[in-house]
């Protein structure tokens, strides 16, 4: 009973938040609603007994990804209303139909298949975090290391891409200097 | 009332559909990124639910890797977006058609 109430409550909240994210015309509302939806999704992980995954969801998504978006939005003009795309009707209808069929097929697979066996079964009496650690550092060690290298590459590329011209401070310059700086930037960047 | 695997799969499908609507109707690249985050999260819910109901940890492992990929995607994508915004002053998708034949 408690599980059902929690599931429906958080399902409603998550759907509402993500609906706001995709429909609002204000970028800041979208960011806030997305962060709230991420937190609500971690509730599902706690209900499902995946405690470590829920903690990682909160730390990585709302702690790191959302903070990164919030800092990144300082570069962009977010006060302006977002205009919607008016695209080709035929393309949209075809893509939507194909994707709907695909989603139905993907959802039907676990419902239809009844003879699935557990590769790495959960051990009774051992906590979720401990089991995750045992499986991750034995069976999934190579993908784990590859993911670590991928994160390192992403960090280096993020610093290199976004870190250009970070030493120049527009607030400490006079107007003439700002104009010169802008022209130089245009030459360097284009 | 017992919550089964199908409840979670249906929820995951609904969230995935919301994310797809976002991907198809958004023009601003930053909000397009938000929609892709919704897609990744809906898949994570399905992974965790299947992992719980079949008593198998593989689903949770894949969810961890999906989270790692999402984090690196955001880092690289935002860096590219900042470069693009410094050059052109906007991040509208329709203006990024310079390679169109």
Image (spheres, coloured by chain):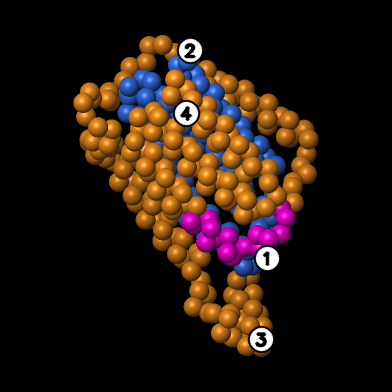
Q: Are marks 4 and 1 in contact (CB under 8 Å)?
A: no
Task: Give the Cα separation between the discs numbered 4 and 2.
Answer: 27 Å
> Position of A31 compared to A86: left or right?
left
Pointer 3 or 4: first along the chain: 4
User: Image point 49% across, 38% down: which residue?
Assistant: A40
Vertical comparison of A103 with A18: above or below: above
- Numbered disc 1: secondary structure: loop
Query: Residue A110, how many percent across, how many down?
Result: 46, 18
Q: Is residue A76 magenta?
A: yes
Q: In this structure image, what is the colour of chain B?
A: blue
Say which residue label 3 marks.
Answer: A175
Q: Main secondary structure of the magenta part?
A: loop
Task: Give the Cα separation between the discs numbered 4 and 1.
Answer: 45 Å
- Numbered disc 3: secondary structure: helix
- Which chain contains the residue that carries disc 3? A
Which label was assigned to residue A112?
2
On whether disc 3 and disc 2 are found on a single subunit, the reply is yes
Say which residue label 4 marks.
Answer: A6
Residue extent of the magenta highlight: A67-82
Camera-side residue: A49 or B15?
A: A49
Say which residue label 1 marks.
Answer: B89
Task: Give the Cα separation between the discs numbered 3 and 1.
Answer: 19 Å
- Numbered disc 4: secondary structure: helix
On whether disc 3 and disc 1 are found on a single subunit, the reply is no
User: Image point 49% across, 57% down: which residue?
Assistant: A68
Q: Is residue A85 magenta?
A: no
Pointer 3 or 2: first along the chain: 2
Q: Residues within 10 Å of mark 1 (few under 14, many from 20)?
A: few
Can residue B10 be seen by looking at this rendering? yes
Chain letter, colour orange: A
- Which chain contains the residue that carries disc 4? A
């Amino acid at each position: 009973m408690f599980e059902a109430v929690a599931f429906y409550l958080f399902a409603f909240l998550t759907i509402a938040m993500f609906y706001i994210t995709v429909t609002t015309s204000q970028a800041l509302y979208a960011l806030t609603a997305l962060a709230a939806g991420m937190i609500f999704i971690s509730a599902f992980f706690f209900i499902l007994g995946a405690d470590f995954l829920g903690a990682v969801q909160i730390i990585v998504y709302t702690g790191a990804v959302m903070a990164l978006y919030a800092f990144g939005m300082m570069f962009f003009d977010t006060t302006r209303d977002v205009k919607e795309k008016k695209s080709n009707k035929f393309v949209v209808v075809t893509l939507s139909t194909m994707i709907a069929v695909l989603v139905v097929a993907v959802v039907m697979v676990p419902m239809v298949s009844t003879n699935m066996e557990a590769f790495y079964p959960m051990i009774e009496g051992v906590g979720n975090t401990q089991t995750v650690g045992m499986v991750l550092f034995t069976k999934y060690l190579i993908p784990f290391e590859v993911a670590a290298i991928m994160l390192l590459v992403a960090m280096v590329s993020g610093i290199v891409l976004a870190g250009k011209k970070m030493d120049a401070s527009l607030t400490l310059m006079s107007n003439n200097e700002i104009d010169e700086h802008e022209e130089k930037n245009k030459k360097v960047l284009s | 009332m017992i919550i089964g695997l199908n409840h979670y799969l249906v929820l995951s499908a609904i969230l995935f559909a919301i994310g797809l609507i976002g991907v198809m109707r958004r023009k601003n690249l930053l909000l397009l990124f938000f929609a892709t985050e919704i897609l990744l999260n809906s898949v994570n819910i399905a992974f965790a639910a299947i992992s719980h109901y079949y008593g198998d940890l593989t689903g949770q492992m894949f969810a961890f890797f999906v989270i790692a990929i999402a984090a690196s995607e955001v880092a690289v994508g935002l860096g590219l977006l900042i470069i693009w915004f410094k050059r052109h002053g906007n991040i509208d998708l329709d203006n990024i058609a310079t390679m169109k034949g």
